[in-house]
Image: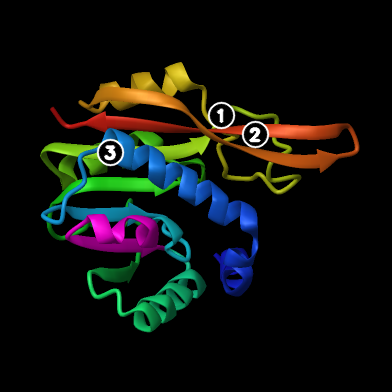
């Protein structure tokens, strides 16, 4: 987590992070009937960009991340904005059980950092109310160039049919999976494009 702690203070100075979040938030709103009665949780929230983008459409949001640096930045934002319906927790979901249940669990660019994807999906199933929603935004399968040489412990994106199968195997009904954003980067070989999908599933 030291790397994310170090990046926390300048995370939102990257316009790509902000643009990506806005695109994901729009897609979630178009597919999930958000309401002020919903209890939501963001997994791997970072500085809370997506939690902030959605919190006015939700009742409460629990924003979780294992990086204390990210949580510190988020708590400063919450205080400054008086966003009283967002609370934070520094935690690793697979190691620490969450108390309570939720109508929505969402995450962006976090699943590829979770070693045990099947374990996470089962945990999400247990945390969600019947009829609750799971929203996962992440990378398509890539060759390792997205993170560069330090890819130890990371999934190199996801093959969509395989992820759909895993989500269904955990008991969810997959409502939709589609591209919602593209990250463009210049390299020695020219421009590289990394599609970002949003998978929406329901505990039916």
Residue 140's disc is 1
Q: Quadrant of residue 137?
A: top left
Q: Which residue is at 45% across, 25% downward?
A: 178
Tell whether label 1 touches label 3 (CB within 8 Å).
Answer: no
Relative to 43, does residue 116 appear above or below in the rendering?
A: above
Q: Label 2 belongs to which residue?
A: 194
Spot occupied by residue 173 in the image (x, y as percentages of width and height): 22, 23
Q: Quadrant of residue 77?
A: bottom left
Q: Residue 89 or 12: which is nearer the viewer?
A: 12
Total labels drawn: 3
Q: Secondary structure at mark 1?
A: loop
Q: Earlier in the sequence, mark 2 or mark 3?
A: 3
Magenta residues span: 51-65
Q: Which residue is at 59% across, 27% downward?
A: 141
Residue 123's disc is none
How far is mark 2 from mark 3, CA to CA?
A: 22 Å
Spot occupied by residue 90 in the image (x, y as percentages of width and height): 36, 69
Q: Label 3 belongs to which residue?
A: 134
For label 1, the crowd category at 10 Å Cα-Cα, with few meaning under 14, some 14 to 19 and many 20 or more, is some
Q: Which residue is at 39% across, 83% downward?
A: 80
Viewport quadrant of the N terminus: bottom right
Relative to 204, does residue 79 appear above or below in the rendering?
A: below
One can see residue 181 in this view: yes
Tell whether label 2 touches label 1 (CB within 8 Å).
Answer: yes
């Amino acid at each position: 987590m030291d790397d994310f702690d170090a990046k926390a203070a300048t995370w939102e100075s990257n316009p790509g992070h902000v643009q990506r979040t806005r695109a994901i938030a729009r897609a979630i709103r178009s597919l999930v009937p958000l309401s002020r009665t919903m209890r939501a949780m963001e997994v791997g929230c970072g500085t809370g960009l997506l939690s902030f983008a959605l919190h006015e459409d939700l009742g409460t949001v629990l924003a979780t991340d294992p990086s204390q640096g990210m949580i510190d930045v988020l708590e400063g934002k919450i205080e400054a904005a008086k966003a009283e319906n967002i609370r934070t927790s520094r935690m690793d979901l697979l190691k620490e059980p969450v108390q309570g249940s939720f109508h929505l669990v969402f995450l962006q660019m976090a699943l590829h950092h979770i070693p045990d994807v099947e374990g996470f999906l089962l945990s999400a199933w247990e945390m969600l109310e019947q009829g609750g929603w799971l929203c996962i935004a992440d990378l398509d399968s890539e060759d390792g160039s997205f993170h560069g040489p330090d890819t130890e412990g990371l999934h190199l994106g996801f093959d969509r049919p395989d992820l759909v199968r895993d989500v269904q195997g955990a008991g969810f009904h997959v409502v939709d999976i589609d591209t919602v954003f593209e990250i463009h980067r210049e390299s020695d070989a020219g421009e590289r494009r990394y599609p970002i999908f949003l998978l929406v599933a329901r505990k039916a």
